[in-house]
Image (cartoon, grey):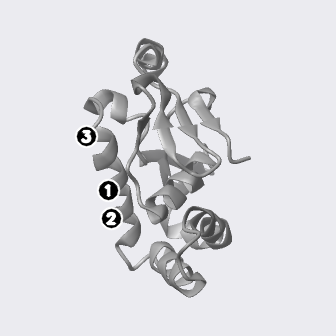
Amino acid sequence: MLEDLRLEAAKGRLSRLCITDDYRFLLLDYGNRELELQPVHKAVYLLFIAHPEGIEFKHLGNYRDELQNYYMATAKLLDKEKIKEGVDHLVNPLDNAINEKCSRIKKVFLDIMDEYSASYYIISSHTQKHVAGSSRIWYERLKVITLPRELVVDKTR
């Protein structure tokens, strides 16, 4: 409930995020300010925008094709083999590439807005506790973008 109140208070300061048909990312309420992201960062961001329920990094391999499609769409001039290689790094749970990409995305937002507002746009952690029966407890460590999806204007679809 506290988070709902915080979200309502922040909505006045949160900008609509427009993803143009040529995959430019614009903050409409910040004077159409463009986010300077490389195609790989855009692909990662698009994947997480498409999954508001969140994704565990260790399960990124299940999203390989979707991520590759986003990467191909955002990096039209890049060789398909380079794209495939880049996606392999991102979905490999033993590689730190996905964390590096998320850190870069976070920095881009923090360069534009305050930390509280940026927290809605970045890919951040959300831990859910699950209890199965009486003795089994496990945690799902999801990564999510908490920006309300009504603030996302996606012109690529």
Residue 42 shows up from this direction: yes
Q: Secondary structure at mark 2?
A: helix
Is residue 33 shown left or right of residue 63? Answer: left
**What x and y, as percent, mark residue 148?**
56, 29
Q: State the CA–CA distance, disc 3 to disc 2.
A: 17 Å
Mark 3 vs 1, N-terminal side: 1
- Residue 136 visible to the viewer: no
Asked if labels 1 and 2 touch by Cβ distance under 8 angstroms, the answer is yes
Q: Which quadrant would residue 52 be assigned to in this image?
A: top right
Q: Is residue 31 left or right of residue 153?
A: left
In front of the other: 45 or 131: 45
Residue appearing at x 25%, y 40% in the figure: 111
Q: Disc 3 marks which residue?
A: 111
Q: Is residue 83 above or below residue 7?
A: below
Check disc 1 and give the amino acid type.
Arg
Instruction: State the SS at label 1.
Output: helix
Work out how far the residue at label 2 is from the one at label 1, CA to CA, in angstroms: 6 Å
Q: Earlier in the sequence, mark 3 or mark 2?
A: 2
Badge 3 vs badge 2, beta-carbon distance below 8 Å: no
Q: What amino acid is found at the position of numbered circle 2 in the picture?
A: Glu
How many C-alpha atoms fall within 10 Å of the one at disc 2: few (<14), some, or many (≥20)?
A: few
Label 3 CA crowd tier, 10 Å (few <14, some 14–19, many 20+): few
22 and 129: which is toward the camera: 22
| Amino acid type, callout 3 | Asp
Q: Position of residue 45 (x, y in %)?
A: 50, 53
- Label 1: which residue? 104
Q: Report whether 144 appears left or right of 116.
A: right
Res. 100 mark: 2
Residue at 43% across, 34% down: 120
